Amino acid sequence: MTEVLEKFKEVDKSNFIDKSQIFELYNNFQAYIKTLSTLELCILFNICGIIFIMSCLSTIIFTFYGDFLINKLNLEKKYRWFYTIAKNIC
């Protein structure tokens, strides 16, 4: 155990972040963004916006549909424990 701690202390902490795969992916994506034209940036922004709107819309639809199913199947009467858990979560 002490050997592991000693080797961890030897690691340069500034290099630890620089060699991270996530940090490298972020740098590559940032370099790619800099190469895009204005039109391509607008298209990328629109695609990201559409994905955000669709995820919000699907969340709202699943929430209303789940509530509809709880009411239609009378889960609050048949499965009282499930109803209390579902209502406590929401």
Image (tube, grey):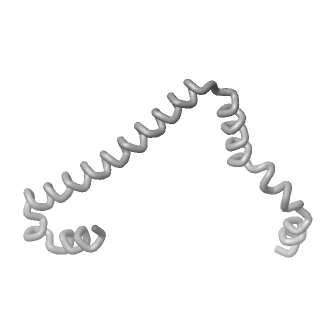
Q: Which one is in front, 65 or 37? A: 37
Q: Which one is in front, 65 or 38? A: 38
Where residue 40 appears, as percent x and y from the top left, is 56, 25
- The N terminus is located in which quarter? bottom right
**What residue do we see at 69% from left, 32% from top?**
34
**What residue do we see at 9% from left, 68% from top?**
78
**Farthest right residue in view:** 10
Q: Quadrant of residue 52?
A: top left
10 relative to 1 in the view: left or right:
right
Q: Quadrant of residue 86?
A: bottom left
- The C terminus is located in which quarter? bottom left
Does 46 appear above or below 19?
above
Q: Quadrant of residue 55?
A: top left
Q: Which one is in front, 80 or 21? A: 21
Where residue 30 appears, as percent x and y from the top left, is 68, 39
**What residue do we see at 63% from left, 25% from top?**
37
Does 39 appear above or below 78?
above
**What residue do we see at 89% from left, 60% from top?**
12
Does 45 appear above or below 3?
above
15 relative to 70 in the view: left or right:
right
**How many discs mark residues in the rendered view?**
0
Where residue 79 appears, as percent x and y from the top left, is 14, 69
